[in-house]
Amino acid sequence: MPLIIFSGLPTSGKSTRAAQLRAYLADRIAAESESAQKNSIDTDTDTGNTGAKPKKPPYRLHLISDTTLSIPRTVYDLSALPPHARSANAPEKDARASIYGAVKRVLSDRDIVILDGLNYIKGWRYQLHCEAKAASTPSVVVQVGCTTERARAVNEARLRRRESKRKRTTETTEERGQGADTGGEAPTSGGDGDGGQEQEEQEREHDGLEGDDEEPYEPDNWDNLVFRYEEPNPMTRWDSPLFTLVWEDDAEQTRRTFDGIWDAIAGQGRKKVKPNQ
Ligand code: ADP
């Protein structure tokens, strides 16, 4: 399993880039498999050997993230814990254990695993690197870069949206209660109805986050994660090769970076990995 470890600040665009990379890799795998199929048919025609079995795709693709494992953002929230429990941070450790388990389960030389997440602790990235090595397969790190201000703005927009949704829900509940008390009609819009959804869409458009449906981090949790973030260092074994994508990278630049990642995990640049080195 070549392992692709995403890393970056909270709300910096990691899941967006991970989804783009997944689509790119799915296309590359399909193209490889098609050309392998074609070559085998050509060979069969040469040898006159017909009835060959269809070739399996060279790789299977997996995307693992907090969302796919239903890990809530609160596991990173130290302020939710009593002071004496903060250094142990059991909820986050449990979350890491389930991520580790999920990665390990699909560990094989034929599986490309995209691990979308904060992956902000260098010791944790080291552990993942060692796991890939033990499976004789390469690991790479993709750092998603964006200014702290930009990432904060995304979280703040999500907080605002959550707050106005809560407000609408409360208002609708109150209106319904009044309608029931007076025997009047129930409201036809607002809350989570059509009017509410329309307002949510407008809010997303206003913030430049169309289609965004993710939950925000609580502000203290977000600040704390930024403070705790340990930047990948390409001089270390476990953070290399290191690829960087920034918010402003356009489709062409993104594709170039993805080509580099493909080369490192499946192309000419793929190094032989020995477990005990
Ligand atoms: P993370 O996974 O780091 O929390 P997301 O991928 O969920 O961040 O991105 C947060 C929001 O920012 C999403 O609404 C997404 O559409 C938007 N976004 C992410 N990257 C970009 C980008 N490069 N350009 C424009 N919008 C982006």
Image: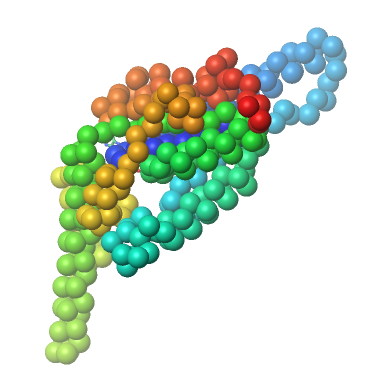
Determine if residue 10 is in view: no
Establish if 169 lies above or below 37: below
Question: Which residue is found at the position 74% from the left and 29% from the top?
Answer: 54
Quadrant position of residue 169? bottom left
* Ligand 1 lies in quarter: top left
In-image side of 165 versus 259 (left or right): left
Determine if residue 206 is in view: yes
In-image side of 215 versus 117 (left or right): left
* Number of numbered markers: 0
Residue 143 position, x and y percent, is 37, 32
Question: Which residue is found at the position 49% from the left and 27% from the top?
Answer: 237
| Residue closer to the observer: 37 or 214 | 214
Residue 18 position, x and y percent, is 42, 37
Picture quarter with the C terminus: top right
Question: Which residue is found at the position 63% from the left and 40% from the top?
Answer: 107
Tell me which colouring the rendered structure shows. rainbow
Establish if 96 lies above or below 259: below
Question: Which residue is found at the position 77% from the left and 13% from the top?
Answer: 43
Residue 4 position, x and y percent, is 49, 33
Quadrant position of residue 272? top right
| Residue closer to the observer: 37 or 82 | 82
Residue 131 position, x and y percent, is 59, 39
Picture quarter with the N terminus: top right
Establish if 86 lies above or below 238: below
Quadrant position of residue 194? bottom left
